[in-house]
Image (tube, rainbow, N blue to C red):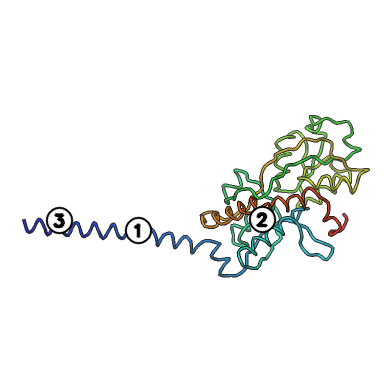
């Protein structure tokens, strides 16, 4: 009996020790995950590094060569709310996801919409902006054409390599030829020069271009394509970053700040005199 009691007592002691160890182990795991979060890296560094690609009015150069735009406002407020400085790292669009994965910067804030292909490589926040795409055409080359007429081998589109418009054009107009460029401006220039019938872009960019070149360019349809949300992109395996970024976005939607900045950059032209005419 005494032996049985000793065995029972030892087993109970081991079980109790194991039960006490489990919460401690779980706590240690949570602490390790938190320490590995990019949020902790940013706090320790005192700087958040943001990757972006230059395209109007998300991000662009002002008359003094400084970066301005919707993304810059978002990035600066995010940094201010974190109590850190901000460093913007302009990156070509087709290389921006590999640059994030390699650690060149902490987060992508560059009008990036979620696609299954992108989501295989990086994670996304809740949307911090919403936009859709419209067609911008060469007026003389497309006069009288219906939307269906754009989907023929005789029509040439131009778009930024790796951008959402390129994907949408390939999906909606598979019969048309598609020329790819590294910058949005180059795609628009092809339409201006008569080397391409049309391109696609998010407003207000197409309407701005029409205002600048009313004799050459036109937005021929009121249709808006792929009206999806744009999100921050960040590296996989970082629940703390996901939590912080999503909460920051939620707070700034509820406060009206994101709406106000969206309206300024995408629904007004009050900022036009800050940038050089193209």
Q: Earlier in the sequence, mark 2 or mark 1?
A: 1
Q: Secondary structure at mark 1?
A: helix
Q: Residues within 10 Å of mark 3 (few under 14, many from 20)?
A: few
* Residue under pointer 3: 8
Marks 2,1: beta carbons within 8 A:
no
Do callouts 2 and 3 mark residues in contact (Cβ within 8 Å)?
A: no
**154, 89: nearer the viewer:** 89
For label 2, the SS is strand
Residue 197 screen position, x and y as percent = 84, 39
- Rate crowding at label 2 as few (under 14), some (14 to 19) or many (20 or more) other CA atoms within 10 Å: many
Estimate the spatial distance between the alpha carbons at disc 2 and disc 3, rounded to whole Å.
Answer: 60 Å
Q: Tell me if label 1 and label 3 are in contact, CB under 8 Å.
A: no
Asked which quadrant contains residue 116, the reply is top right
Outermost residue toward the front?
255
Query: For the N terminus, which image quadrant?
Result: bottom left
84 left or right, relative to 203: left
On the picture, is 221 further left or further right than 20? right
Label located before the other in sequence (2 or 3):
3
Q: Position of residue 146 (x, y in %)?
A: 83, 30
Q: Measured along the vertical axis of the image, is residue 166 above or below residue 274?
A: above
**Disc ID at residue 245:** none
Which residue lies under the disc numbered 2?
A: 109
Given the current orientation, which residue lies at the most extreme bottom position?
45
- Mark 1 sits on what residue? 23
Residue 28: x %, y % from top left? 40, 62
In-image side of 48 versus 163 (left or right) = left
Q: Residue at x 60, y 56 (%)?
A: 248
């Amino acid at each position: 009996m005494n032996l049985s009691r000793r065995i029972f007592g030892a087993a109970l002691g081991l079980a109790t020790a194991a039960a006490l160890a489990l919460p401690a182990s779980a706590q240690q795991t949570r602490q390790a995950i938190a320490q590995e979060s990019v949020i902790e890296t940013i706090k320790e560094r005192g700087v958040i590094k943001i990757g972006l690609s230059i395209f109007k009015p998300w991000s662009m150069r002002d008359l003094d060569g400084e970066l301005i735009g919707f993304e810059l406002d978002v990035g600066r407020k995010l940094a201010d709310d974190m109590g850190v400085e901000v460093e913007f790292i302009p990156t070509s669009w087709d290389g921006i996801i590999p640059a994030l994965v390699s650690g060149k910067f902490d987060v992508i804030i560059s009008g990036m919409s979620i696609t299954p292909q992108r989501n295989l490589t990086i994670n996304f926040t809740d949307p911090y902006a919403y936009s859709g795409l419209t067609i911008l055409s060469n007026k003389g080359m497309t006069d009288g054409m219906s939307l269906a007429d754009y989907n023929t081998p005789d029509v040439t589109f131009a778009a930024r390599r790796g951008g959402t418009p390129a994907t949408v054009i390939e999906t909606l107009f598979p019969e048309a030829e598609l020329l790819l460029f590294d910058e949005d401006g180059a795609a628009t220039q092809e339409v201006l020069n008569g080397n391409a019938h049309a391109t696609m872009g998010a407003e207000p960019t197409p309407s701005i271009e029409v205002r600048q070149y009313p004799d050459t360019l036109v937005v021929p349809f009121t249709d808006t394509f792929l009206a999806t949300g744009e999100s921050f992109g960040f590296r996989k395996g970082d629940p703390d970053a996901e939590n912080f970024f999503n909460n920051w976005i939620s707070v700034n939607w509820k406060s009206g700040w994101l709406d106000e900045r969206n309206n300024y950059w995408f629904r007004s032209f009050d900022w036009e005199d800050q940038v050089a005419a193209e």
